[in-house]
Image: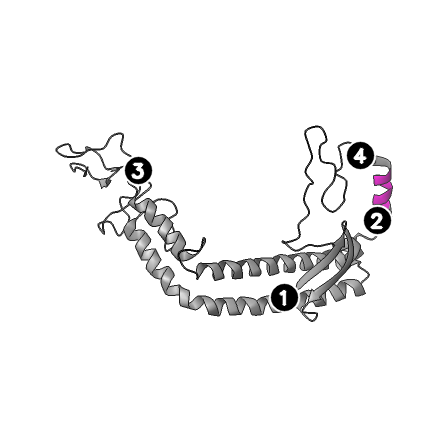
Amino acid sequence: MSFDFLGTFNRSQFERFLVFARSQLPLVDGRIQHLRAEVSRIGTVMFRYTKGVPQGFAANPANSYLGKLLGAYEVLGGNPFIDLRVRLRSDPVFKLKGTESSPSQFMSNGEVIGGKGLSDAPTSELMLEARDWLTDTLRSRFDSLERKIRRAMDYSDELQSEIATLKTIQLSATTVGSLEYIAAQINQYLSDQNYRAVFDDRGGDAYGFHVYAPFSSYDVVGSRVSDTPQRQNSGYVGPGESGTG
């Protein structure tokens, strides 16, 4: 795979990648437009909660894929308020903060954090008997639709996350997360001789043959030469070669 290196590379490899990445920036607007259309097709679902109790929900757009799934779910007898209670990534459920003397006992939606040892074997057996003959019905009516709804919501979240990332990538070097900002950070490491994972090969190793050479125990400079290939503060040094000070 092209550009499959991560934290170990040289300047030639990085600059070749950067040329390619910059050539793709003009295509980002079209990609964002496509992703927005897909978000509109899939839709989003927003549940409104008060102390963890659902008060209402709506699919936007109403005729989106998620809107149709929710409509089918209700027609088949499902209750989105009780059985689904799905949330957007921006509205998570979390454990409330406790103290050293008073540990947390509730989640943010008001649910009590359970303990071990439920001691519910008798009622578990009875409930299994009461529900067993409905297993196929429950799976065909609700389980399949619930999985589709949750997967579609996750997909919608991921699409919107990708849109946000792409919008940031386009921005200038002063914006954290933009391509130019990341490039500037990497170039600082390429110029830092004390950081040996990457180095400036000065155009001499476009194929990256030398990037995985072992780190030197000590640097060779001046009249001293290396017996083995190694990476040192001045970059790669081959056998019989000497680095710069």
Judge whether residue 87 is colored magenta: no
Contact, mark 2 vs mark 3 (Cβ under 8 Å): no
- For disc 4, the neighbor class at 10 Å (few under 14, some 14 to 19, many from 20) is few
84 to 31, vertically: above or below: above
| N-term-proximal mark, 4 vs 3 | 4
Q: Mark 4 against mark 3, which lies toward the viewer?
A: 3
Label 1: how many Cα within 10 Å (few below 14, some 14–19, many 20+): many
Q: Which mark is residue 131?
A: 2
The image shows residue 1 at horizontal and vertical percentages of 39, 54
Give the residue type at disc 2: Arg
Q: Which residue is mark 4?
A: 118
Q: Mark 2 touching mark 1, by CB under 8 A?
A: no
What residue span does the magenta drawing correspond to? 123-129
Q: Are marks 4 and 1 in contact (CB under 8 Å)?
A: no
Residue annotated with mark 3: 194
Main secondary structure along the magenta-highlighted residues: helix
